[in-house]
Image (cartoon, coloured by chain):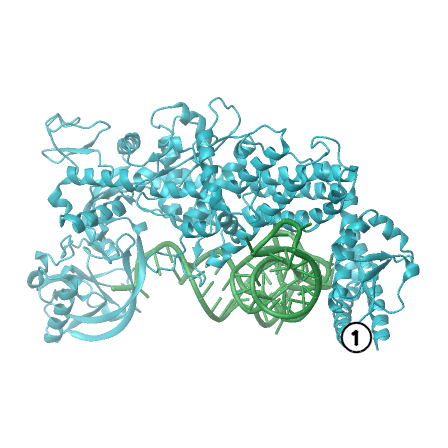
Amino acid sequence: MDLDPRYDPHAHEDAVHQAWMASGVFAPAPESTAPRYVVMIPPPNVTGALHMGHALNGTIQDIVVRFQRMRGRDTLWLPGTDHAGIATQAVVEKKLWAEKKQTRQELGREAFLAKIWEWKEEHGNKILEQFRRLGASCDWTRTRFTLEPAMSRAVREAFVRLWEKGLIYRGARIVNWDCALGTAVSDDEVLMKPIKGHLYYVRYPVEGEPGRFVTVATTRPETMLGDTGVAVHPADARYRSLVGKRCRLPFLERSIPIVADDTVDSAFGTGAVKVTPGHDPADYERGARHGLPIVTILNLDGTMSREAGEFAGLSREEARRQVVAGLEERGLLEKTEPYQHNVPISDRSDTPVEPLVSEQWFVRMAPLAGPAIAAVRNGALELKPARWTKVYVDWLENVRDWCISRQLWWGHRIPVWYDADGVPVAARMDLAIGSPHPTTGRPIVRQDEDVLDTWASSWLWPFATLGWPDRTPDLARFYPTQFLSTAREILYLWVARMVMAGYELLDHLPPEERCPFSTCYVHATVLDAKGRRMSKSAGNGIDPLDMIARYGADAVRYSLVLLTREGQDVKLSEDRFEMGRRFTNKVWNAARFVLQNLAGPRDEPGGARPAAVEDRWILSRLSRVHAEVTAALEAYSFNDAAQALYRFVWNDFCDWYLELAKSRLAAGEGAGARAARGTLERVLDATLRLLHPFTPFQSEVLWKALHAADGRAPARMLAATSWPAVPPEWIDGEAEAEIGLLQELVGAVRGIRALTALGDRAPLAALVVAPDGGDRRVLEACGERARALAFLSRLEIRSAAARPPSSAVGVAAGLEVFVPLEGSVDLGALAETLARRLDKLEKALGGVEAKLGNPGFRRSAAPEVVEAEETRRAEMRREQDLLRRNLEGLR
RNA sequence: GGGCCAUUAGCUCAGCCCGGUUAGAGCGCUACGUUGACAUCGUAGAGGUCAGUGGUUCGAGUCCACUAUGGCCCACCA
């Protein structure tokens, strides 16, 4: 198989993907009894398109899954999508309006839902397709959707169980009302955004005391129409005489009490606060404490209600203007000052939410939180990075009840039916209209119109996808899972709730097997080059599919992993992907070189370890990198693993080993060439396997090419191949020391040559002299490698007798390296450089001397550390001496 | 108001858990070389008071405290 000199990912990715699909390697083996490794994909919204966060998360999961699969685990990565109630309904509603100028109400519930399903069938697979292009090795035959019938059964079962335990209740509570979408949203779907507004000081006349006022400060004067009280702090001397009295609400002329409440901050505004229980969460609680009535002054579409009297029907903004004008007219507006405050904004519609009281369904969360907290305390669940544990526990310890009803159509309809008296009952199976109510016996008249929050299905994801509530073989085999990788913003919305659901609902399992995953990895947030969050609305996103088109999926994956530290945000710009592209190209060419040189007799890969030092060296390095990558992947330190591989492939294998092998390969048929070929094959084989979790497409192509060239290995997919076994015994300190010496010598000689600016014009020679005076030892140590050395640097190694009269001196590994100064050398520049080096060296030497002269150091430091420092000092002194002599010679 | 994270080369970031080589990498820049695996690659170089202050220690980029700056998360200041 001929390989192009430049890696072209697009020439291969599709074919590799097809081959994977055809082979079924991603599905767990039917009869496997190996320990399992299961990952549930965080289901992306069906309406979504792959963004960088997905790409990063997908890459991380795929690395883990491929690694575990290669290690022989019974591996399942289950994919799927989330029906995303609000988002999806909004998309189809918008489309309906754009195309037919119809609203969903005009179309009717049934027909509208049919439209959404139609849309889902047509567009809902897009994002999973994009995950495939990234190389995600999911078992696509098990793809799930949160609104499919099997999930509905699970959702119902969960609902009814919680209902039966009394954990679900309906109540009039203050909720976040999204006026744009016409539904309640949960606290976790609301963001606080600072908005520049005003603080209005409004006078309320005190009843029975003409001319006396109590002044309250508010940012939302229109809500005064819903006021049912005024509160002051009980210890506030200014108002003590007013507590218990009443004042008169302007416009509506309602009589409202003045109460004392210690949540009031005397230092803010006037120290008196209007209480609007119907439209402010804090006031709702204050109102409840003092028995104040709730007045709702808004309709569900955000306009003022009948309760607003003369302002009824106005928009909120217009009502504010008119209320302020009215107050001014009556002389009740004391003053207005500019004020910046936080306004709750719906994350779903990006419009301000209106806190208002409405009837919703809630789940009591406190009883569910306990086991979820215990899970991280007893080690059943580990969050990575660990600092998220505190965030997670804090949320659970202060968890508030979850508003689970949504006034939408697209979602799991709430399985509650009512009789004519409005007595609700939850049921696993639909109750027909007219059938008897299970508890009251009266006929059922209707089902609840609302649907459940999307998260009320996704919190069941880790087990509902496996068939729960049925005790299916899949559930027994794959639950609980091992790894969950997720974005931090859904730690509460999703992760914590899944843990709660696992402990609450999987009661057929012993408690220690209920936690839905044992490791939760919170991945980095992807930011743009300026450190801002990537978002569609800001237009600063980088489309991963564009990057895949330009650089290839493997390059995108590798770049992401190289850039991402655990839990540390990553700033991304397009040019960052160049790194991955260059690396994949380097791997490609290294493999290409190996394949071009594999023809001819070679040592068996399974045979004895080669004798030549460079072979032993690269196998030693391979053994180290194998251990490093394996340990890093086990610890989910993806970046460490990727870095280690990068350095090994580039700096060890390509820069040194391939160069050292060239001279032996050029020699043709001898033992050296045979050993070199055997080692090349061995190292490439293992390297491709180590790379596979990171760069699955390319490694698969090269693996196939290697085995075609090799002719004796079975044609197996790399994705189905085992993690390489590289024994730790291959680590060879002697070989590493010797090649290390060679590297230093070559580096030093080249360095001197570069700084003398001799270039290639003058024939060069280097002389190496050992500290004991003889050059023989070094030449012997380099042995055959002298040729390689010459090849690498076009240098000759001469014996001591041939020492040139005028030469520049350097030191490498304690050895003197002389480069004869023949030809035209800029001696001034050379002297300058040497002086600078000497200066730097002497500074460092001073540090070492000080350290060794320090009695505390000798007392406390480990003996080997002291010894190493002493060696270092000796080397530095020697170098100092040489540099001085050099300088003298030049002057 | 509470909490978390970051601050190291022109840029993007490692190193800190477990204190002890002359603080590293990639990109960019300079010089030289190679261009028969690599529209490249290699080698060398320039470039850093490790945000600041104080402390612990024989010794601090690394541990502790505080400060500054930037970012994020929670929270009922109207």
Chain B's colour is green
The chain holding disc 1 is A
- Kindly identify the residue that appears in the image at 90 percent across and 68 percent down: A805
Q: Amino acid at mark 1?
A: Leu
Residue linked to disc 1: A827
Q: Quadrant of residue A729?
A: top right
Left or right position of A804 against A28: right
* Neighbours of disc 1 within 10 Å: few (<14), some (14-19), many (20+): some
Location of the C terminus of chain A (image quadrant): bottom right
Pinpoint residue A170: horizontal percent, then vertical percent.
Answer: 21, 41
- Kindly identify the residue that appears in the image at 55 percent across and 40 percent down: A699
Q: Residue furthest top?
A: A31
Left or right position of A175 against A43: left
- Identify which residue, A688 or A482, lies in the foreground: A688
Q: Can residue A891 be seen in the rendering of this structure? A: yes
Chain A's colour is cyan
Count the numbered circles shown: 1
